Amino acid sequence: MRDIVSNKIFWFFAIVVFFITTSFSINFDEDSFYGIKTVVIDAGHGGHDGGCQGSFSNEKDVALAISLKLGKYIEENFKDVKVIYTRTTDVFVKLDERAKIANKAHADLFICIHVNSGPSTAMGTETYVMGLHKTESNLNVAKRENSSILLEDDYETRYENFDPNLPESYIVLNLRQSAFLDQSLNFAAKVQSQFKDRVGRIDRGVKQAGFLVLHQTNMPSVLIETGFLTNKEEEKFLNSAVNQDYMASAIYRAFKEYKQEFDEKEVKPEQPKPEKEQIVEEKNPEKEVSSTKKDKKNKEETGLIFKVQIATSSQKKELIPENFNGIEAVSYYEAGGIYRYTVGNEKSIEAANILQLKLKEKGFTDAFIVAFNNGKRISLSEALNMK
């Protein structure tokens, strides 16, 4: 009877978490990023944590080899991108430290490289993003990768009694990364496409599961399983230096495509500005302007503020409800010669999520969250890292 009650409680909370993360996932457009400037590459396992074992090799070595090759590709081809590695040698790095490295660097993307384990017939690549596992196999992969914490002396304290072998431990992991789900899925899909089309690997798809290494990162994050060491054919393939280079170059091409999408959005031609009166009233283009009948500025806001952006225009609109589907208290900031209209001055991302949903119901289906610190626009990943 006690087991039945426990299962009911577990599934109740699982459903609640699924509803929250599905409803409150944040949508971004090109304004949410200022380009991809910093990438953290995380080679799974290391040191006394060998990861999964093949007949003659182990996961930690293959993951490190591919990670270093990937980083070299990015460094050589994108001089404006800083590459940070969680490890470059055979050392053990705790799972929470890997996320801390990425957060401290204000990374724009976190790429975690692993190798899979399973039946001897299992083959192919799969890329994971943080989320509720929908199948037993997804949960098993997360359990295996998360079991690295059991090699840490203080894991019960560091991970608040998280047990990688208990399904109940996974229901609270999804909340933080839901803010970056769209971007993580976008990059993951590009990775899988490159593996399939360029390297000829079996595509096992983009999946979701609860990985500890992903759930505390404040940026789009993926965990890539590059193949199965428990399959003799794939183990041989993954231990070839040439094939490791193929795999690294495939991930690099996915990164290149992902980065170019944002770069093109940043530099794309804006709408023509009006021929007359080109003077912008605000000297500081990042300063928020409040909504009043006379369109005057309030005192500059201080601290971290979340707003919901609902519209843009090349010419300044009068801040009256009639121009914004009846929405009151609309404000704007100017950047790149474009006026960007926002609603709200929320102190938490949760409150901004709720406001975003309300505005979408009002017809602003593309509404997304932006962050300001002391009146200056900052990226959402930086804002979440400040909380």
Image: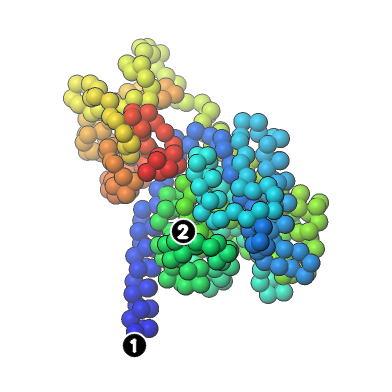
Residue visible at 76% across and 64% down in the picture: 57
State which quadrant residue 17 falls in: bottom left
- Classify 68 as above or below 130: above
Residue visible at 44% across and 39% down in the picture: 382
State which quadrant residue 76 falls in: top right
- Classify 329 as above or below 109: above
Give the crowd class for mark 1: few <14, some 14-19, many >=20 residues within 10 Å.
few
Q: The N terminus lies in which quarter of the figure?
A: bottom left
Q: In this view, does 345 lie to the left or right of 136?
A: left
Residue bearing the label numbered 2: 158
Q: In this view, does 81 lie to the left or right of 220?
A: right
Instruction: For marks 1 and 2, give the CA distance.
Output: 33 Å
Give the crowd class for mark 2: few <14, some 14-19, many >=20 residues within 10 Å.
some
Q: Looking at the picture, which amino acid does disc 1 mark? A: Met
Pick whichever, 261 or 188, lies toward us: 188
Secondary structure under tag 1 reads loop
Residue visible at 50% across and 47% down in the picture: 100
Q: Looking at the picture, which amino acid does disc 2 mark? A: Arg
Residue 233 place in picture, x, y as percent:
79, 67
Residue bearing the label numbered 1: 1
Residue 385 place in picture, x, y as percent:
43, 43
Q: Residue furthest left?
A: 293
Q: The C terminus lies in which quarter of the figure?
A: top left
Task: Please name the colour scheme applied to the rendered image.
Answer: rainbow
Give the label, 1 or 2, closer to the camera: 2
Q: Residue furthest bottom?
A: 1
Q: Answer yes or no: is residue 368 visible.
A: no
Q: Is residue 228 left or right of residue 343?
A: right
Residue 104 place in picture, x, y as percent:
50, 41
